[in-house]
Amino acid sequence: MEIYNDAITGYEIRRYTNGPERNSKLYFTCENFSADDKYFFFTKQQLEGKNDGGTWRTEVSTGKLERVTDDTYRGFATDREKNVGYVCKNETEVYCVDLETLQMTKIGDLPKYGNVTGHLTAANTGRIACSYHLGSKYYALVVLDPGHEAQVVYQTDICLGHAQICPTDENLIFYIHETGGDAYQRTWMYDVNERYARPYYVEHPNEWITHEVWSADGSEMAIMKLDPPGFVDGDAGEVHTGNIIIADKDGRHFDVAVSDLQLLHPCISRDKKWLCADRISYLGTKVQEGVVLIERASGKAKLIATTHSCKTGADHQHPSFNRAGTQILFSNPDENGIAQVCVIDLEQVKKDW
């Protein structure tokens, strides 16, 4: 663990990894910390000639590293409330991982010959849901209730991704049409009981919706709405505004919480008083990349940590809060653009807010 002060913001940062391989935090659409915030989890890239890829656990206070899974496992994510994680072995076997002991218990199987297209997600009832690529090459939403056979509840020939079951409502699964960029209608909500899919944020021409996440209590979502290419702001040249929209669970009410330069991936603190997002160079616009903290009540946004530019989408910062809301974990692209895992304590930031 290396401790340094950010060259631009001055805040103290703790860096826990040092390449050459990619060490990236879990995706921002799931919890990244154990229930007591003692540990966080990240993914190490498997390099040729090495055998240390997979998911790793880090003790926040000491930087001690322990391997959780090897590179044969996929889709690791932690539960919103219970101190467990979920992961796939050999693409289809689902295991529950005790985040304290790291003991793994098999809890079911996904459909044969397929693979997840994101991470696993779980509701407070224990139901697991994911977007899935079936052996038939159709895309699907799959649910797995522990002790029961997995169900394919929805199929389509459109690539599905970012599936997130509502943390407090096992009947609702949010998902997207994954194009790798913009989509005519990206966001969808699926009713498991009714077997019914409907648009969530209904898009209009020249709207670009992206990167959505549930709040921990399942009452709302944060969505990024990008200004379309071609927006010009005075002498600054072509810039793009990331508008963080807060939407209610039913997708009937949408409020812009903040608009700021080049924001991309938003996340909500568990008390819902704070947002964070990464600031990234995209659509041809170069900026100082880093992590932005936003106070929801005032809409004030502040760059709190800076990074080098991301080499790939897998190296994006993807910031997210710990469960207490006292720290932000983020991937910090190094001088080669490769993600390394960092934490910033927010007490120092809030002192001069």
Image (cartoon, rainbow, N blue to C red):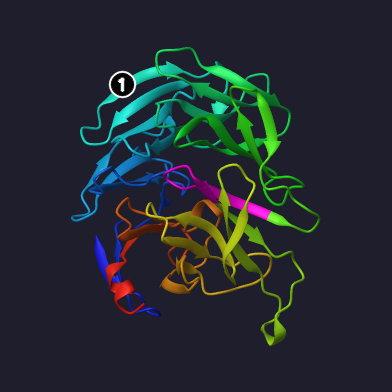
Where does residue 81 sit, x and y in percent of width and height?
33, 38
Quadrant location, the N terminus:
bottom left
Q: Residue furthest bottom?
A: 235
| Residue position marked by numbered label 1 in the rendering | 105
| Position of 289 relative to 132 (above/below) | below
Residue 156 lies, in percent from the top left, at: 71, 27
310 horizontally vs 191: left or right? left
Residue at 43% from the left image edge and 27% from the top image edge: 88
Residue 188: x and y in percent read: 66, 39
**Picture quadrant of residue 107:** top left
Rendered position, 21 above or below 109: below
Whether residue 33 is visible to the viewer of this picture, yes or no, is yes
Q: Quadrant of the C terminus?
A: bottom left
Look at 41% across and 38% down and name the residue there. Answer: 77
110 or 349: which is nearer to us? Answer: 349
Identify which residue is drawn at 28% across, 42% down: 35
Q: Amino acid at mark 1?
A: Thr
On whether residue 157 falls in the magenta region, the answer is no
The correct choice, above or below, for 226 with respect to 313 in the image is below
Horizontal side of 107 relative to 151 (left or right) equals: left
Check the image and name the residue furthest to the left.
Answer: 62
The residue stretch that appears in magenta: 209-221
Asked if residue 138 shows in the view, the reply is no
**Residue 149, percent from left and from top:** 49, 12
* Residue 210 on the magenta span: yes
Per the image, label 1 sits on a secondary structure element best described as: strand
Residue 85 falls left or right of residue 287:
left
**Tag count:** 1
- Residues 340 and 320: in front is 320
Q: Magenta segment, principal secondary structure? A: strand
